[in-house]
Amino acid sequence: MGFLNTLPGAIVQGLIWGILAIGVYITYKILDIADLTVDGSMVTGACVCAVLVVAGVNVWIAMLAAIIAGMIAGLLTGIFHTFMGIPAILAGILTQLILWSVNLKILGKANIGVSARTYAVAVTQLYKGQAILVVLGICAVLIGILYWFFGTELGASLRATGCNQSMSRAQGINTNANKILGLVISNGIVALSGAVLMQYQGAADINMGRGAIVVGLAAVIIGEAIFGKISSNFAVRLVGVLGGGVIYYIVYQTVIFLGLDTDLLKMLSAIVVAIFLAVPYWKRKHFSKIKPKSGAKKDGVTDNA
Amino acid sequence: MLELSHVTKTFNPGTINEKVALNDLSLTLNDGDFVTVIGGNGAGKSTLLNAVAGVWKPDCGTITIDGADITDIPEYKRAKFLGRVFQDPMMGTAADMQIEENLALAARRGKRHTLRWAIKKSEREEFRKALAELGLGLETRLTTKVGLLSGGQRQAVTLLMATMNRPKLLLLDEHTAALDPKTAQKVLEITDKFVDEGKLTTLMVTHNMKDAIAHGNRLIMMNEGRVIIDVSGEEKKKLTVETLLELFSKSSGTEFSNDRALLG
């Protein structure tokens, strides 16, 4: 029975990390950028939300502020990457480091408690049933907005930017502006997940984002592997990413329940992600007759007719 | 309509790999000109097209289209005037997106990307008709991902995209070089058809001398970053591969060297 009791908690946390993973999906899958800002912008979202809630601001307004703070972090990475020509990974690491200081300044110390008993929060582990419903609601609104956005002219130009930059520029698309826009949207979503996780845990902690990108990637990969075959519909894919987050957390809780040393969890997560990232590469290398051509994006070459 | 004036571009200046790709090149295209560009390896053919497309800025010289100086305008803004097809069939289309999504992006080339839906219902019918004219059976596959198409199909779709909204100038950069001879022929037929119908001013780089002679109303040959031969009208119609090679060695003082040009 002990394990079953942990299940609702795992589902809520999985969904919250699933929100983060949707943010990661936008940069990693759509824009083809590995954005490490995530580890910092998630904490920024948590800090901004925590400080505002403690100051008596309505929790939904606090979450909105968290999203905007995350978007500013994404903007910074975008400017580093495009305007200053810094490789995307390094740009993200620089912003992450900047955010470490910023987050400390926002919190004023390494962590603050935001207990649901004292403050009016929207999600708390004290009421897991309610938490699941609220988080599901947030996810539904988020997926709805993203489904709409990526179906618009602007959204399509953003997808094209991630898919083929030569083609995009030849079709009059400002690829640099689109990369910045994608990073802004992504980090806004990531900050939202941080704000929700802060409420659920009842505390904001300067360290809560460490390795967030790996969890996000794991959720994206699991989601693609399990739900990717069902449909190529964009909304279904995003639901798959959420599902990936939930599965990740259930597995996570299971190994903890089985008594695995929790110190090893981050290492195991990273190894699992590394293996999953390697599989498509090995497949291409050993099972593909057509060698990828230069200038082509990796994906889509092997299934070329 | 297109005027390049004293354009020079040097790659890797000051290094052992320094290469003068365009050397004080001047060229004027008239409205409706279909110019084929031929030349040896590294003669500057693709560099010429990239200069016009704005992939980078020339070291010096100016480029104008219809009297407007576009030398400092970034690549994505020039796209408003230009239709482009690349040598690599992968480069001209977005592989992960559907055929109709690619076409819809092309239909909005040079316009602001708004928050309206990416494809209007009325457009689908137009796309279907346009695809049917290619004669490749793509009109029933509007929602197929472009990545699943063959190289020839992709080049045909790219051509269709490049000629939408009637660009002021069509740039074809060895767009049949990566295709098998039969497919290449088909793509060239489609090219002629589109250029004729739209009366498009066109700059077509090719490695194939026969193609260069058979298509267009004007032929230029490049060597070491300059235009060394420029023939048009009746004179071009009489050209043969032999006379072209003779002209080349007379103008440049060397033998023509292109490992692919003679085979084609």
Image (cartoon, coloured by chain):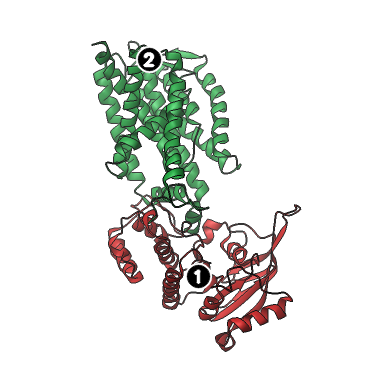
Chain colours: A green, B red
* Residue displayed at 51% across by 80% down: B214
User: Mark 2, chain letter?
Assistant: A
- Residue under mark 1: which chain is it in? B
Q: Helix, strand, or loop for circle 1? A: loop
Give the secondary structure at mark 2.
loop
CB contact under 8 Å: marks 2 and 1: no
Q: Is residue B61 left or right of residue A283?
A: right
> What amino acid type is highlighted by mark number 1?
Lys
Relative image position of residue A119 (x, y in whole percent)? 35, 14
Look at mark 2 in the image and give the residue it sits on: A202
The crowd level at tag 1 (other Cα within 10 Å; few <14, some 14-19, many 20+) is many
Q: Which mark is residue B168?
A: 1
Image point (59%, 62%), residue name: B50
- Disc 2 crowd rating (10 Å Cα; few below 14, some 14-19, many 20+) is many
Give whichever of A221, B70 is nearer the camera: A221
Q: Position of residue B257 (x, y in %)?
A: 66, 70
- Say whether residue A15 is visible: no
Percent of width and height locating residue B139? 30, 64
